[in-house]
Structure formats: C-alpha cells, structure tokens
Image (cartoon, helix red, strand yellow):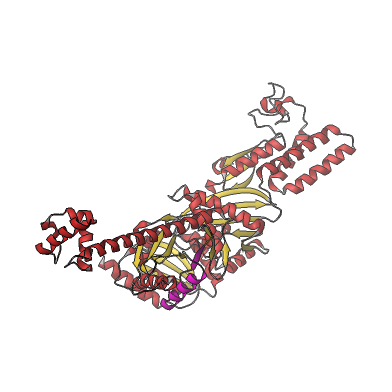
Amino acid sequence: MLENKKKIDELRKKALNLPLLPGVYIMKDINGEIIYIGKAKALKNRVVQYFRNISSHLPKVYQMVIRVENFEYILCDSEFEALVLECNLIKQHIPKYNILLKDDKGYHYIKISGGDYPKISGVKHSDTVNAKKDDKFIGPYMSAFAVKKMVEDTNRVFKLPTCSKVFPRDFNKKRPCLQYHIGLCSGLCRGKISKEEYSDTIRSAIEYIKGDGNVEINKLREQMQKASDDLNFEKAAVLRDRINSIEKIRENQKIFTSSKLNRDIIAISAGEQKCCICVLTYRGGRLCDSVLHYFDRNGEFGDILSQFIMQLYSQSNKIPDAILVNIELSDKQSIERYLSEQKGKKVSITYSQKGEGHSLVLMAQNNASEGLSSISKLSGRDISALYELSRLLGLSKPPSYIESYDISNMGNKNIVGGMVVFKNAKPYKNAYKRFTIKDQLMQDDYSAMAQMIERRFRDYLDPECTDEGFKTLPDLILLDGGKGHVSTVKAVLQKLNIGVPVFGMVKDSSHKTRAITSDEEISISKNRAAFSFVSSVQDEVHRYSISFQAKRHKNSSLEMTLTQIDGIGKKRAMLLLKKFKTIKAIKNAEINELCSISGITAEIAERIKEHLNKNT
C-alpha cells in the first residue's frame, strides 16, 4: 500500500511539470503496455487530476490509475489535432480502459440474392464472407432488429416471395403458399410475372431501402398515373396498393420525421459503473437503424460521448449531415470540424432542447436508459427522471448524488434540520444527517438553514473528517423552500468556495410540490418522471426533519420531568434517557441499575424512584 502511494505521489509530481498546452497523454502499466489514451486542452491540469485524491475516482478510473506505472505525452498545436491524434492512437493500440467499439463482424446486412429472380433477406456479417459472386449487400447495420424490420416491410410493400422456392425452377410445381392467398405475395411461383416486371419491382425495392420514402412514393404516383393514362388499370392498381402499403407502414411505425436531412440521434445514459449509448439513424427522414452500445464508465459523460462519436465515424463512410446529442460537448467544434473534413461537407452537432429534435433525443435517451436499466439496479424510470431533471435545471450531467435539506421547529424551541441523500434516484439512508440548530433563540428558517449548510460543508473541507456522508460532494442540492432559502445557501457556499448547484422545491397551497426555483421558477408538472422524483425527495426530507423534531420535543419533555428531581440536572437526565429510553423503564429499574449511571448515588436513585412513583 505504501509502495502504491509512493508511486502515485511520484506520478503526480511528474504531472505537475507538464505544460499547459493541448496534447495527448498515454498511460502505461508495469509491463509497458498502453492501458489508456486521452486528450487534453491543457495537459498539466488534466493529467494531475488522475493522481490527486484517487479514492474519489469512479471505480473504472480508480482501477486504471492504480495500474499506471508511467505515462508519456505528445504535444499538439491545437485541441483539434489532439482530438484526431487521440482517435487514431486508440484505434491503433486498443487500450484496455478506453471506450472501444466492436468491428463490423457483429454487423448485419440486407442481402439481394443473385439470379434472374432475386430475393431480399437479412444476414449476418459471416454470411457475406462465402457469398456467391452475384449476391449484393446493403449495409452494414449494427441492429439486427432494424435489418429484420426493413426486410419484412420491403417484402410486404412490394409483395416479394419469402418462401424457399427457387425460380424459375419451381414455377407452377406447387400450389401458392398462404402469403399469396392473404395478399402479401404477388405469386411469382405461378409463373405469370415476367423477368422484366420482377426486375423492375426489385429495383424499386432497393431504392425504397436505400432512399427517401417520400421520393419513392412520388415516383410510384407518377408511374401509377402513367399506367392509368395508358389504360393499364391492372398495373395502376398494383402501384396504388404499393403506395397505400408504404403510407400504412409509415403511419403505424411513426418513425418518419419532417426533416429529410440524414441525421443520427445519439444519447448517453450512465450509472456509477456502466453506461449505455443509443444511436438512432435517420436517412431521408426515416428511421433506418437503432443500436445500443454498452461500456464501463471511465470518465465524465461528455468525454465518453466525444470519444464514442470520434470512433464511430472514423471507421465509417456514412457520416450524417447532422448529429443530435443529449448533453453539451465541450469539444463540439473540433469534432464538427473533423467530421466535416471527413465527409467533405458541413456536419453539425446540436444539443437539442426543443421541437422535433428534442423529441428524437428523448426517444434515444429513453432507449439508452432502458438499456442501462437492463444491466444495472436502476430502473429506466429512475434514469429518465435524473436526465429530465438535469435538462430542466441546465446541469451538465444527470445528478447521481443529491442532498436535500429542510428546517423544522416548534415555536422558538427545538429548532432542527434534516439532510437526506438520494443516490442514483434512491434514498441512501446511510448518509442521512440530523442537525440541532445551536444558539438560536428566535424562529428564523433562513439563519437555521445557513447554519446547517455551513456546518455540513465545513466538515467536508476538514481533512480530518472521515464521515462518508460529509466527505462526498453532492451533484445537486435541493432545499425545501423558495428563493430566500436558495439565496441564503448560495451565499454560504460561495463563502466556502463550494461549487454545487442549488435549487429550491416550491409547494402549492396544498403543500404539494409545484415547481423548482433558483433565480426564477421552473415548472416541472409537465415532466412526469422529474416531477414524481422531486416530489418524493421533498416528501422524504420533510418527513425526516419532522420526525427528528418530534423526537427532540419528546425527549425535551422527558428531560423536564427528570430535572424536577433534586440531584438530576440536564446531563444526568440525558444519560438516564439514553440508557433506559423511557420514563417507564427508569421507574421500573432496580436501584443498582440506576446507580450504574455516572454521578447517581443510591440516595439519588431512591429519590428518582420515589418521584416517579408519585407523579407518573
């Protein structure tokens, strides 16, 4: 342990000598293997963070840091150059602790078989290796579900055969299957469709898969009109049915957008140790693919998402025109520049907070949250609540560790405060704290709140404090109160140089949560997940502080009963209550049991028994 501490100290000293310039840092283990590669706008500031207070790191980061034996660095002329170099080095060395994407062996393709009468089906990457010469493939797609759905829809719209028959060999050899009889197949097996007609249908189907749904519908309408003008009503009816099928699929799936831009929607959802990233792929306004990526969490959300985007598109020639994300990226401009240069035209990255774009981001975020919930103890609802809350409050990331405070009093006496903690959206009772407000004779909630907050964070700043509940810095503070409480607490935190966002929870006339406030009120009633969560926080902190106040009031009454006895002061009364809990237990105790309390003699014990038997 001492050797490890010595090594960390040496690495920190080395990091302190780094320049405040952009570059890439390379972490190596005892065998000289590269285990992590990162970039920084200012190398010194970033690398020093790894070797300072390492016990507070995320589990994955901690495991990496304790394995670092040495590090190297490469200076760059700009943050952009550092971004590109980091991406290239990660692909080259595949470090253990970096975000790593799988290669295309896990991808899926849409297959158009060869021959005069091709069929459309979904296949895995392995099936493309030994494919026939004239087989064609569209892809790759990362989602098997997306491939399956596209193949099913295409075959249904164009009434293509999905059976095992081989054409033209099996023309008229067997009766048509059920698909033909229920109108889902054109009945190629009957031999009444010419090779040219079928080839035209396959070409249209491929255009439908690759292209814009609206363009395809417009083409079909033109063809239908021409067939009708030529009095070819049978062909016009077929085209009419095809148009209706496409529109019905679009209506039922609700996967089309008003924008015809090629867009990818990328959202991250993260817990303490794991994270999930969802990518929704829209081409020509149509949802073409959806895939979830799972990683160990090894840093801040923005860093993980930036690294993911760079890797995703550095190994793909299908860079979209626009990318929508669910969090702000500090290096957005550099990534946009890189992707624009790769694509040869402008690529934008947007943190979308309103309109249709926001709806798409929410859909991706909900998918990522559900994906994360499947591999963690968190429910999708809890994850969504934290993300919703972070968006409403303008936080840089969802708050995984939240503290909430409330003051409770009965007149001018027994003024107390309660602190409750929610960790990953669940009450974390090990970190709950109770405060007795000292030296305050008059009822003043603002002053009491200020005293409680100052005592709590002075313990945080105290290097000798070892209490977990005080040594953890929260991501967010929620107060049971309005703007006045928020202003009071912000002033205390500013004095202590503590940078934690503070908001108040405002109640309506029925004492129910109505809004969140800071400089102005933020309505949360329309955001169900966030509203339910904040309400549960407010109810819990109120319950906790009230129960403490009630207990204090009860103990105060019991102390008053005991201090009426000659020889029992406040201190001895508290010792008696601490040992026996109730007046009845004290009354029924033996003389020798009472004498076990420091300062209580046999004479005082007799006096206690006599007083309690007479007055209770």
Residue in the image at 50% along x and 72% along y: 484
Please identify the quadrant where the N terminus is shown. Answer: bottom left
Is 340 contained in the magenta span? no
Q: Position of residue 235 (x, y in %)?
A: 82, 34
Horizontal placement of 453 versus 576: left or right?
A: right
Q: What residue is rendered at 47% in x and 70% in y? A: 485
Q: Is residue 441 above or below residue 169?
A: below
Answer above or below: position of 600 versus 275: below
x, y percent for residue 458: 36, 73
Residue 430, image x and y in percent? Answer: 34, 58
Quarter of the image with the C terminus is bottom left
Q: Position of residue 222 (x, y in %)?
A: 83, 44
> Between residues 241 and 381, which one lies in front from this camera angle?
381
Q: Which residue appears farthest toward the front when viewing the image?
A: 614
Residue 318 seen in the current view: no
Using the image, determine if residue 413 lies above or below residue 253. below
Question: Image quadrant of residue 324?
Answer: bottom right
Whether residue 465 is visible to the viewer of this picture, yes or no, is yes
Q: Tell me the magenta residue range.
A: 481-506
